[in-house]
Image (tube, rainbow, N blue to C red):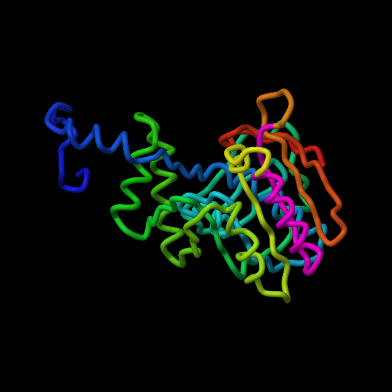
Amino acid sequence: MLGGEAQWDNPLAEHQEFLARFVAEQGVQTNEVQRSWVLAPLLLRVAERTGVSTLDLVELGPSAGLNLVWDRYRYAYEAGEWGPERAAVRLTGEERGPVPARLLEGEVSVRGRVGIDRSPIDVTSEEGARLLRSFVWAGQTERLERLDRAIDALRADPPELVRGDFVEELPEVLAAQPPDGLTVVFQTAALGYVGDQGRKRVREALETAGAERPLAFVSTGKPRVGGEDWGLRLVYWPTGEREFAGHADFHGSWLRWEL
């Protein structure tokens, strides 16, 4: 247990030096799988709107990349379900505005998966998986079990995780995407940590790439002005057309579909 370094009933004082160093040096790096319950209809909408069923994904700030393998999970909504019937991860939540049944009838496959993160966590290793588990709050048994099942799903075929600042790395990653498909860039709250200048540079990278190839951007994050809920936004290139799909909870526990 705990990597063989300690037992749950050990007094904290016995590991004071390690704990002090860990808290000082290790940044918090979470990966909330429940957010995929909100991402799934957004990505299905991209496929519907563009008429493209095979996607190449790029995630900004993916942590371990568990939401990059969203299509390996099973989703339940009021109008139906989507995803592999035997998926180990099954997600549902509260619908305050129903997801349309037509979206759940769509077929989508993922060809490529790339994430860009300053401190990606490699959960294909036991050390990385243990680190990610350490950021789950005490007593959240269901969340921890969901995390473990998602780690198993990712290990079957891990996504590529690029270590670096996505503001800096995004242009190069986009340039390396296959030219014969639809690249979908998505983020869940990551843009809130890079400031106005960082967000501007991300937009510029998307617009530059979108002028050269089909591209879509899926963004879930807190509205810039007022409100505590996430706003769900989509942008399509080469036209730059925008859609507002609704609102959701920060951790994906509820969704109000409005599109």
Q: Is residue 50 magenta?
A: no
Residue 20 horizontal/vertical position (percent)? 24, 32
Q: Quadrant of the C terminus?
A: top right
Specify the quadrant of the image occupied by residue 215. bottom right
Which residue is rendered at x = 22% and y = 43% of the image?
A: 2
- Judge by depth and name the residue closer to the eye, 169 or 217: 169
Question: Is 203 included in the stretch rendered in magenta?
Answer: yes
Q: Which quadrant would residue 219 be assigned to in this image? A: top right
Q: Residue furthest front?
A: 197
Q: Is residue 228 left or right of residue 119?
A: right
Q: Is residue 98 above or below residue 175?
A: above
Q: Nearer the viewer, residue 45 or 23?
A: 23
In this view, the residue in front, 83 or 239, is 239
* Magenta segment boundaries in residue numbering: 198-222
At x 23% / y 34%, what residue is drawn? 19
- Against 161, is 30 above or below? above
